[in-house]
Amino acid sequence: MGNKAIYPGSFDPFTNGHLDIVKKASKLFDTVYIVIGINTVKDRTFDCDGIKEAIELTLSQLNINNCIVCKYEGLVAEFAKIHGIEYMIRGLRNNMDYNYEENIAEVNKLINPNMEYIYFRAENVAVSSSMVKELFFYNRDVSKYVPAPIFEYLSKQCDSL
């Protein structure tokens, strides 16, 4: 069975900052579920399936074999409960992230009281999915902010626009 953690997010797109958190978590946990949340209220910029495949390719290329990438439409705390996951992984760039995450943690604790949060300090606080999207749509090179398979996926999306 082993210890399991969940790392949820929209990952729209998945950045090197996200990858850094995954690398850290994969060293501490037997299994890390990278859960791409599908929020019916928010529109995604990039296709969930394409991002999922690019994340899986990234992990494969880095020989990170203890992560499972999946999509989920619903409450993350329920996903964790269903899969017997007691640890939620989150990355923090600053105190605003911490305050935001703590509010969400309180709600998730109501749904899944056994859930424990583990925060990892982000190495590059300037990198965010929002920043990457903005640069990308202004035709700026984002290759240094995302893993290579993600960049390849984004480039294909640009070609099809």
Image (spheres, rainbow, N blue to C red):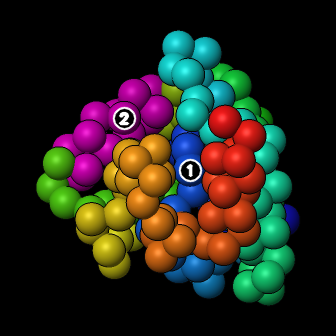
Question: What segment carries the magenta color?
Answer: 97-110
Q: Is residue 137 above or below residue 1?
A: above
- Quarter of the image that includes the C terminus: top right
Q: Is residue 2 visible?
A: no
Rendering coords of residue 147 (x, y %)? 61, 72
At 27% from the left edge and 67% from the top edge, which residue is drawn? 125
Q: Which residue is mark 1?
A: 13
Question: Is disc 1 placed on a helix, strand or loop?
Answer: loop
Hey, which quadrant is residue 107 in on the image?
top left
| Side (left or right) of 39 relative to 123 | right
| Side (left or right) of 68 relative to 32 | right
* Label whose residue precedes the other's in the sequence (2 or 1): 1
At 56% from the left edge and 50% from the top edge, which residue is drawn? 13
Rendering coords of residue 36 (x, y %)? 66, 42
Rendering coords of residue 14 (x, y %)? 57, 56
What type of secondary structure mainly makes up the magenta span? Answer: helix
- Quarter of the image that includes the N terminus: bottom right
How many numbered circles does the render carry? 2
Instruction: Kindly give the residue lying farthest to the left in the view shown.
Output: 95
Say what amino acid the circle numbered 2 marks.
Ile
Q: Residues within 10 Å of mark 2 (few under 14, many from 20)?
A: few
Q: Which residue is mark 2?
A: 104
Of residue 107 and residue 53, the one placed in the foreground of this image is: 53
Q: Which tag is nearer the camera, tag 2 or tag 1?
A: 1
Say what amino acid the circle numbered 1 marks.
Pro
Question: Is disc 2 placed on a helix, strand or loop?
Answer: helix
